[in-house]
Image (cartoon, rainbow, N blue to C red):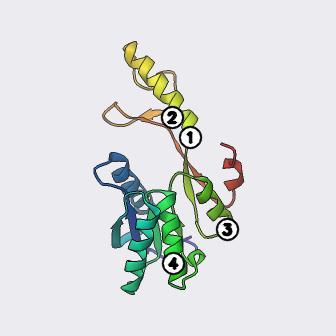
Amino acid sequence: YFKEKGQTDVRYLLIQGPLDLSHSVIRSQKPLEILKDAGFNMVEVATISADYDRAKAQQGVESFLETGKEFDCIISNNDAMALGAIEAAKNAGLDPSSFPIVGIDATADGRQAIKDGTLAMSVFQDPNGQGGGAVAAALNLINGAALNEGTNFDVDETGFILWVPFEEVTPDNVADYDNR
């Protein structure tokens, strides 16, 4: 999206879950790292802590929008908060499809928002992969094997976190995730 616009500086609003949860930190850092690695200069306009709650995100984004600060996108730690941002934009008279809003989890509501054109994308976490990965990791630990032995999953640098790949959900493939 930003490459097509010829844009190198990206002003973002970040909506976070509780920072005492490691996955909130990762869900905040990883999208920014990916965009930086793609050559974008990421400029934080504001961060809203909304505890993975749609209403809190909506209230926070509504307050932010009243400041008049300019932004290019909204990055959310989950779909529920992204949907709150969509509602806030609509309430402020903004077209939420006029700038990217992204979430994580590819929930039913999030997938519908992608189909409606108000959520630019989400990220699917494979519950079957996570469950199977957890069982495989437990068996590997019991047997003294590497955490990811016998799987297609990577481990982090500590060797204690098994990464089940996230899958990008966009308007092009959203229907593929309706029954997963």
Q: Residue furthest front?
A: 55
CA distance for labels 4 and 2: 34 Å
Q: Is residue 144 left or right of residue 81?
A: left
Q: Earlier in the sequence, mark 2 or mark 3?
A: 3
Q: Where is residue 3 in the image (x, y as percent from the top left)?
A: 54, 71
Q: Is residue 80 left or right of residue 12?
A: right
Q: In this view, does 107 lie to the left or right of 68?
A: right
Q: Where is residue 7 in the image (x, y as percent from the top left)?
A: 49, 76
Q: Position of residue 142 (x, y in %)?
A: 38, 14
Circle 4: residue type: Ala
Q: Are marks 2 and 3 in contact (CB under 8 Å)?
A: no
Q: Earlier in the sequence, mark 1 or mark 4?
A: 4
Q: Which of marks 4 and 2 is in front?
A: 4
Label 3 sits on a secondary structure element that is helix
Q: Name the residue under label 3.
A: 116
Q: Where is residue 39 in the image (x, y as percent from the top left)?
A: 43, 65
CA distance for labels 1 and 4: 30 Å
Q: Mark 2 points at which residue?
A: 130
CA distance for labels 3 and 1: 23 Å
Q: Name the residue under label 1.
A: 126
Q: Earlier in the sequence, mark 4 or mark 3?
A: 4
Circle 2: residue type: Gln
Q: Residue furthest right?
A: 175
Q: Residue at x 53, y 28 (%)?
A: 132
Query: Does any portion of residue 152 appear in the rendered image?
Result: no
Q: Mark 4 points at which residue?
A: 89
Q: Are marks 1 and 4 in contact (CB under 8 Å)?
A: no
Which one is nearer the viewer's eye here, 151 or 93? 93
The quarter of the displayed image where residue 143 is located: top left
Query: Does any portion of residue 101 appear in the rendered image?
Result: yes
